[in-house]
Amino acid sequence: MGSTETGTAESGPMARALAEARAAGARGEVPVGAVVTGPDGAVLAACGNAVEAGADASAHAELLAMRAAAAGRGSRYLDDCTLYVTLEPCPMCAQAASLFRIRRVVFGAYDPKGGGVEHGPRIFDAASCHHRPEVVGGVREREAAALLRDFFAGLRGV
C-alpha cells in the first residue's frame, strides 16, 4: 500500500474501490470501481460501473461517484477530495475530475488504450485544462489489472 491510501491495504479507499469493481463485474459490468473521500478520509461515495444496467455509456464508476459525492455535499466542487479508481480514468472521466475540481486522483491499473491521464490525450496536461489534480497511478495495480483481465478472458471464453 502506498502513502496515498488511508487505512490498511485491506480496508482503505482503494480496497473499497476494488470491492465495487468486483461487484460491478458480478453484475456483468466492466469491473471498475471508484470511491470519493473527503479531506478527513471519510468515504463520500462509492460506485461501480453501471453502463449496461443503465444503458448509459457515461455511467462510469468515477463519474457516478463524483456526481454522488457532489450531490451529497450540495456543491459542484470537490476541491478537497480524493478520487480513487481501479482503472486510469478515460478522457471523459478525467475531464469530469477537472470540472469537479478533484484535489487528487489515485488509480490502480494503467490503461494504454483508453486512458486519458497518463495515456491518450493526457487531459490534465492540456493547455485547455483549467484544474490539474495531483495524480498517483499504479496503486494496487496488479490486483486491479487482474480483475479486468479475468473479466475479459471470461467474455472470450478463454
Image: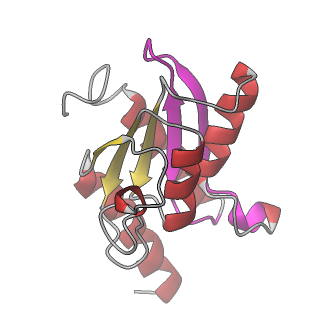
Q: Nearer the viewer, residue 156 or 117?
A: 117
Residue depicted at 30% across the width and 28% down the height: 5
Residue depicted at 50% across the width and 66% down the height: 91
Res. 28 image quadrant: bottom right
Q: Is residue 121 shown above or below 137?
A: below
Residue depicted at 29% across the width and 53% down the height: 143
Q: Is residue 120 shown above or below 76?
A: below
Q: From the top left corner, tell me how far across and down residue 90 is, in percent.
A: 48, 65
Q: Nearer the viewer, residue 66 or 6?
A: 66
Q: Is residue 40 shown above or below 125?
A: above
- Residue that lies at the very extreme toward the right in this rendered image: 54
Q: Where are the magenta residues, as a range?
A: 28-53
- Residue that lies at the very extreme toward the top in this rendered image: 40
- Residue that lies at the very extreme toward the left in this rendered image: 2
Left or right? Give the position of 69 relative to 36: right
Q: From the top left corner, tell me how far across and down residue 103 is, in percent.
A: 43, 32
Q: Quadrant of the C terminus?
A: bottom left
Residue depicted at 48% across the width and 27% down the height: 81
Q: Is 52 covered by the magenta stretch?
A: yes
Left or right? Give the position of 148 relative to 143: right
Q: From the top left corner, tell me how far across and down residue 125 is, in percent.
A: 34, 59
The chosen color scheme is secondary structure
Left or right? Give the position of 18 relative to 145: right
Q: Is 30 covered by the magenta stretch?
A: yes
Q: Is residue 132 shown above or below 16?
A: below
